[in-house]
Image: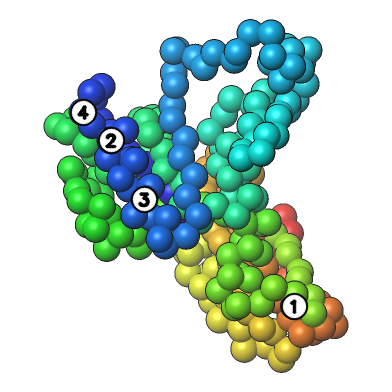
Amino acid sequence: MKIIQIVGRSNAGKTTFIKSLIGTLSAQGTVGAVKHLGHHGFLLESGKDTTMYYESHAALSGGIDEEKSVLVRRENDLDSTLETLCNAGIEYAILEGFKSRLFPRIVIGDLESENVVLRNPTTDEVIAALPEFEDYYTVEGLVRELRRECGVSRPGAVLTFTGIGGDRTVAGSPEFDETADALAASIRRELETAPGIIGARVYHRRGQPHPGEGILYIAILAECSEEAFAAASSIMDRLKREHPDQEM
C-alpha cells in the first residue's frame, strides 16, 4: 500500500485537491482516504443503534445498508487505521494532515515542511512521482500485493513469516535502514529463484516492533507447500547465520 500524505494550512485547498486525486488514483487501484480530525472530533448521530453499540464499549460497531457499510472503531491511532486499510486490500492510502508523522508528503499552499516530495502539484505529477512515496504493508497486505503482482488467485501454497534484521545498536539510523532494505531485496531475489516458487515479496517495516528497530515481513507463493517450506527454511537458516543475535 502506497501512503500519500497531504499537508497544508487550513483553507489551502487540501480537500479539493484530494477529491481530484482520489479520482485519478482510482484508475490505478483501490484508494482509501483518512483525515486527521484533531480536537474537532467526529459526531456520531445520537440515538442510532450503531452509536449506542459504540457507547456500550463495543470495540467495533457497524451498519450495512443497500449501498454501503459504516464501521466505528475504538482505536484512534493512525497505525491501526493503516493496518485496517492494508488488510482490506487498499493500494493507495491518502492521509490529510498528521503533520507529526513524517511520511514523504505533498504540501498544498506555502506551509514550510520536511520530507516534501511535491508542492502544489497536478494529479498527473503525483502519479509520475508515486515511487517516491512510502510503502506500508501488513503481512496480509503483502500477500494481497503478491497475488495481484503474480496474477494468481489460488496458488498451491501461501507462506508468511517475519524476522528482525540488523544490529540494534545502530537500528533506526540511515545506515541501518539501507542495510535492511538491501537485505530485503537480496532475500526476495533468492526466494524467486528457488524451485517451485511462483513469487515472493519482502518488506522492511521501520520502527517495528519497537521504536528504532525494523522487522522483515516475508510472503511466498509456491506451487506446493513442500517447496514453500523448503524456501522458507533456507531463508531462516540464512538469517540466523548472518544475524545470530536477532529474533526470528
Q: Residues within 10 Å of mark 4 (few under 14, many from 20)?
A: some
Residue visible at 43% across and 48% down? 3
Disc 1 marks which amino acid? Answer: Pro
**Relative image position of residue 113 (x, y in whole percent):** 24, 35
Q: Is residue 191 left or right of residue 4?
A: right
Marks 1 & 3, CB-CB < 8 Å contact: no
Residue 141, compared with residue 231, is above or below; it is above
Distance CA(mark 2)–CA(mark 1): 42 Å
Q: Nearer the viewer, residue 171 or 85?
A: 85
Point out the tag, 4 or 1, that comes first from the N-terminus. 4
| Residue 224 visible in the shown view | yes
Residue visible at 26% across and 52% down? 123
Disc 3 marks which amino acid? Answer: Gly
Residue visible at 41% across and 38% down? 95
Q: Nearer the viewer, mark 4 or mark 2?
A: 2
Disc 2 marks which amino acid? Answer: Thr
Residue visible at 51% across and 62% down? 180
Residue with the mark numbered 2: 16
Residue with the mark numbered 1: 155
Q: Look at the numbered disc 3 and give the secondary structure of its residue.
A: helix
**Relative image position of residue 1 (x, y in whole percent):** 51, 55
Distance CA(mark 1)–CA(mark 3): 32 Å
Q: Look at the numbered disc 1 and give the secondary structure of its residue.
A: loop
Residue with the mark numbered 3: 23
Residue with the mark numbered 4: 12
Q: Residues within 10 Å of mark 1 (few under 14, many from 20)?
A: some
Q: Nearer the viewer, mark 1 or mark 3?
A: 3
| Residue 228 visible in the shown view | no
Distance CA(mark 3)–CA(mark 2): 11 Å
Q: Nearer the viewer, mark 2 or mark 1?
A: 2
